[in-house]
């Protein structure tokens, strides 16, 4: 099969690319390397890598006219909520306008596509007290990031319904695993934490900055489970035109994550507290009944996932 993965050099995209390549598929990646890294690929010689931005319409049109894809995973985005708060206009260009453009090229040029899968986010639900979040829960975006993710997933569904572009969307909760770039201050909290532990192990005295009191709750899902969910959604007939939460249905607060990592590493990480981030959500946990109806099961608890990740590093 032939796959296009936008954002394929990033965290989720590179894990997906490496898995598909290992299974013998052809993969084309478009990534501007703003967050992703070439080194994330296990074997660059097997990837058709195109360095460029998804907001470059001419580039995307040429990619979508020169290849016929079986599956497209659209993962490229300004992927951080905090980054989107700092750069709302750029976020909108990348996270919404580029998606509309790509869907329109797909409508014109990709007649044999089996599925376009759009990476949306749990951020669309906002901080509404109703938990767990179902796909039918109220949508209360609190940032430009969340507004654009919701708009783009609706556009994907509309292109499915009006123009027969086969499309589905997934709302990721908090994904963690190898290749999550810890260098950006906006990276996922688990990758930042692991970077702090590793640097302390190597003799640096690095403290972790905890925004808020650590009682914020997330539904952390390990990358292996996410890849499984992505393939299920892409390949299932019943997922056509639908949106799926991708989480574990388990709540973990940051204090628990730090306590577990202190146990795994065998020392106590120094922590300093700062005010909660603007736009931060206090509690987030998924209802994944819809994903389970496609045959999904969660294989890794947060503690199994963290142990595997620490071993991998
Ligand atoms: P990531 O930042 O590691 O990956 C995104 C990739 O997109 C990067 O490689 C980056 O270089 C690339 N990119 C950014 N702007 C681009 C542009 N204009 N043109 C081409 N490439 C561009 O993030 P990730 O965690 O792998 O997230 C993948 C997708 O999943 C994103 O759409 C993100 O919003 C969504 N998501 C992730 C999480 C999570 O927990 N990681 C949660 C919810 C949603
Ligand atoms: C994640 C996704 C985001 C969006 C959202 C959906 C990442 C990087 N971002 O945002 O794309 O889809 O989920 O709800 O996965 N924190 C600290 N110290 C740090 C870094 C973070 O205390 O150095 C806190 C942060 O304030 C937040 C929590 O950790 O309360 C999780 O932060 P995050 O950036 O990992 O993820 P989140 O949920 O903001």
Image (tube, grey):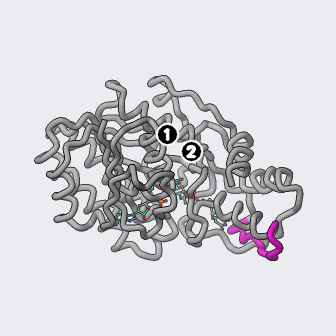
Q: Position of residue 3 (x, y in %)?
A: 32, 43
The reply to whether dot 2 and dot 1 touch (C-beta < 8 Å) is yes
Whether 245 is drawn above or below 175: the answer is above
For the N terminus, the quadrant is: top left
Quarter of the view holding residue 206: bottom right
Cα distance in 3D space between marks 2 and 1 = 6 Å
**Residue 211 magenta:** yes
Whether 83 is drawn above or below 260: the answer is below
Residue position marked by numbered label 2 in the rendering: 223
Q: Give the side of residue 283 with respect to residue 304, left or right.
A: left
Q: How many marks?
A: 2
Who's the residue at 42% across and 42% down the image? 21
Q: Residues within 10 Å of mark 1 (few under 14, many from 20)?
A: some
Q: Residues within 10 Å of mark 2 (few under 14, many from 20)?
A: many
Q: Which residues are magenta?
A: 201-212
Q: Give the side of residue 1 with respect to residue 249, left or right.
A: left
Q: Position of residue 16 (x, y in %)?
A: 46, 45
Q: Position of residue 295 (x, y in %)?
A: 49, 23
- Of residues 149 and 99, the one drawn nearer to the viewer in this rendering: 99
Whether 32 is drawn above or below 47: the answer is below
Q: Give the side of residue 213 with respect to residue 87, left or right.
A: right
- Of residues 178 and 139, the one drawn nearer to the viewer in this rendering: 178
Who's the residue at 60% across and 43% down the image? 221
For the C terminus, the quadrant is: bottom right
- Of residues 270 and 272, the one drawn nearer to the viewer in this rendering: 270
Element marked by disc 2: helix
- Of residues 81 and 297, the one drawn nearer to the viewer in this rendering: 297
Residue position marked by numbered label 1 in the rendering: 227
Quarter of the view holding residue 95: bottom left
Q: Position of residue 172 (x, y in %)?
A: 49, 46
């Amino acid at each position: 099969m032939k796959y296009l993965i936008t954002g394929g050099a990033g965290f989720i995209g590179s894990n997906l690319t490496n898995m598909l390549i290992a299974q013998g598929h052809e993969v084309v990646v478009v990534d501007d390397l703003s967050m992703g890294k070439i080194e994330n690929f296990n074997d660059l010689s097997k990837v058709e890598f195109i360095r460029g931005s998804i907001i470059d319409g001419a580039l995307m049109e040429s990619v979508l006219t020169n290849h016929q894809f079986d599956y497209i995973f659209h993962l490229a985005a300004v992927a951080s909520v905090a980054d989107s708060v700092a750069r709302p206009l750029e976020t909108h260009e990348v996270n919404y306008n580029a998606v509309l453009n790509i869907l329109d090229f797909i409508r014109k040029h990709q007649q044999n596509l089996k599925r376009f899968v759009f990476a949306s986010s749990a951020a669309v639900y906002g901080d509404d007290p109703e938990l767990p979040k179902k796909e039918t829960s109220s949508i209360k975006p609190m940032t430009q990031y969340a507004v654009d993710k919701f708009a783009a997933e609706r556009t994907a569904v509309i292109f499915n319904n009006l123009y027969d572009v086969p499309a589905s969307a997934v709302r990721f909760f908090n994904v963690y695993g190898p290749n999550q770039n810890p260098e950006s201050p906006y990276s996922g909290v688990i990758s930042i934490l692991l970077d702090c532990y590793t640097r302390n192990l190597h003799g640096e005295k690095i403290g972790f900055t905890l925004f808020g009191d650590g009682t914020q709750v997330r539904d952390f899902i390990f990358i292996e489970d996410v890849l499984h969910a992505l393939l299920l959604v892409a390949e299932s007939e019943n997922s056509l035109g639908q949106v799926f939460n991708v989480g574990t249905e388990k709540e973990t607060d940051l204090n628990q994550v730090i306590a577990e990592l202190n146990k795994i590493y065998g020392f106590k990480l120094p922590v300093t507290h700062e005010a909660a981030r603007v736009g931060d959500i206090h509690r987030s946990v998924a209802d994944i009944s819809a994903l389970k109806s496609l045959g999904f099961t969660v294989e890794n608890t947060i503690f199994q996932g963290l142990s595997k990740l620490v071993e991998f590093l």
